[in-house]
Image (cartoon, grey):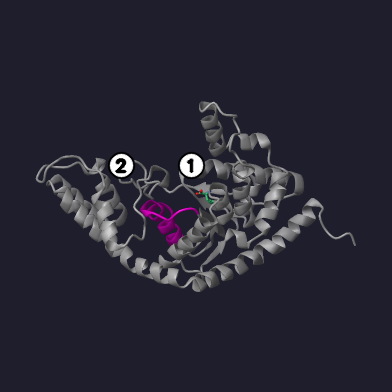
Amino acid sequence: MSQHRASAVEKNTILTGITTTGTPHLGNYVGAIRPAIEASQKPDINAYYFLADYHALIKCQDPAMVHQSSREIAATWLALGLNTDNVVFYRQSDVPEITQLMWFLSCVAAKGLMNRAHAYKDSVQKNQEAGEDQDYGITMGLFSYPVLMAADILMFNATRVPVGRDQIQHIEMARDIAQRFNHVYGEHFTLPEAVIDDHVAVLQGLDGRKMSKSYGNTIPLFLPEKQLRKHINKIKTNLLEPGEPKDPDTSTVFQIWRAFASNEQTAAMRREFENGIAWGEAKKQLFELIEAELREPRQRYYELLESPSHIENMLNEGAEKARAVSVPFMAKLNRAVGLHSLS
Ligand code: TRP
């Protein structure tokens, strides 16, 4: 409890990372990137947003893909208007102190705690079902994933970590590991809290399930206009004819509409559904709404991809700001565990 009080007097520090595998989709935008950019505009907040490229190596061993994805995800944040004067925006691998801290944390983290991590347990279960050795294909990277994530968070003493529900366990593990370290070496780390925003939509994908790369049902964020229209036309609907009233609350088209519309636009579309709007017409309007929000950022996105050195400069500035914190903090931690000069 005393640790809580200590952190409450400090300015809130929010921190979040996106793993650099794959291309961002509308679900990432609505559920994570857009709210994170909004949060970064509030006063009284320190924001750290980063490309989790060390994490990427766990899932993806295709160097070209890891590299390309870093570029695309960095360009996405910048194109959407992230103001790097307000936010420390960096690449995880530019802050090597994070992996140094990870080792310190590994030496206090209980293996039994890691055994309970969902991602690891799922892999073990799949192996058992397939009749394989239970650790078949499981790397130390996957097993240690929560320790790396704890290092990301604790390095900057983040107080609030906005994440999806699937990541709550990782934040709890970070707290647990921080507590152990504090217990052994003194109060170095603030205990982070997961922030789950119930107002932020978990977007449905083309088939009505949660929009997710693993379901293959996504709408990529910066599709060219024609392709965006095509994808929206693929959203699954029922067979009700024009003129027949439709239920907005079970409709993926309406659910996505709501994530982009104002309250008035949402109310108006609800009435249109009740009046039996044709699916084709609803999708056309949805396309126009999304297109209006994304047209300009998309333009900037493609421009940014053409000037990687601009992106690189932004990331280098971010790394400098991040290391202004991580280098002295790591020096302090080295001393705390007994690793320092003999003279
Ligand atoms: N594990 C997160 C995800 O897959 C990404 C991530 C890595 C992260 N380090 C983090 C998120 C630290 C928040 C804080 O979505």
Q: Residue at x 42, y 44 (%)?
A: 214
Q: Position of residue 39 (x, y in %)?
A: 45, 60
User: Three-letter amino acid code at disc 1?
Assistant: Asp
Name the element at disc 1: helix
**110, 76: nearer the viewer:** 76
Numbered marks: total: 2
Name the element at disc 2: loop
Q: Residue furthest left?
A: 243
Residue 260: quadrant of the picture = bottom left
Label 1 neighbour load within 10 Å: few <14, some 14-19, many 20+: few
Along the polypeptide, which appears first: circle 2 or circle 1?
A: 1
Q: Is residue 238 left or right of residue 328?
A: left
The answer to whether residue 42 is visible is no
**137, 115: nearer the viewer:** 137
Res 166 label: 1
Q: Are marks 2 and 1 in contact (CB under 8 Å)?
A: no
User: Three-letter amino acid code at disc 2?
Assistant: Gly
Q: Residue at x 20, y 57 (%)?
A: 285
The quarter of the rendered structure image containing the N terminus is top right
Q: Position of residue 314 (x, y in %)?
A: 53, 70
Ligand 1 neighbours mark 1 (CB distance < 8 Å) = yes
Q: Which residue is mark 2?
A: 208
Q: CA distance from mark 2 to mark 1?
A: 19 Å
Residue interval drawn in magenta: 21-39
User: What secondary structure is the stretch in magenta mostly built from?
Assistant: helix
The quarter of the rendered structure image containing the C terminus is bottom right
Confirm whether the magenta stretch covers residue 26: yes
